Image: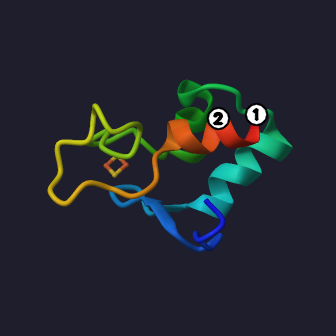
Amino acid sequence: MAKFNYSYKVCECKNVTLGEIIHAIKEKNAKTVEDVKDITDAGTACGCCINATKDFGDPKMQLYIEDILKKFT
Ligand code: FES
């Protein structure tokens, strides 16, 4: 994940960056995808940014909310 900037857009639909999601985890105690959705709005539209299984896009996204949660919680 080191190759991603804080400004990297994880959720295209809602325009939510990696930095915002990390902030939700570290400062606002987000522990689940639902928490991240509630706090940041990421993942609340198409859902492709949640995990690879939910990603119906082509090309696939490079970074998912679940990966970020695994890394920071
Ligand atoms: S990319 Fe996050 S909800 Fe669509």
Disc marking residue 73: 1
Q: In the displayed image of the protein, which residue is found farthest to the right?
A: 27
Q: Is residue 1 left or right of residue 53?
A: right
Residue shown at 70% from the left, 27% from the top: 31
Residue shown at 80% from the left, 33% from the top: 29
| Image coords of residue 70 (percent x, y) | 64, 35
Q: Is residue 52 visible?
A: yes
Which residue, given by chain and number where applicable, does mark 2 sit on?
A: 70
Callout 2 secondary element:
helix
Task: Look at the image and name its color scheme.
Answer: rainbow
| Image coords of residue 30 (percent x, y) | 71, 33
Q: What amino acid is found at the position of numbered circle 2 in the picture?
A: Lys
- Marks 1 and 2 sit apart, C-alpha to C-alpha, by 6 Å
Residue shown at 64% from the left, 51% from the top: 21
70 versus 27 height, above or below: above
Is 62 or 21 nearer to us in this picture?
Answer: 62
Q: In this view, does 65 lie to the left or right of 72?
A: left
Q: Can residue 39 be seen in this view?
A: no
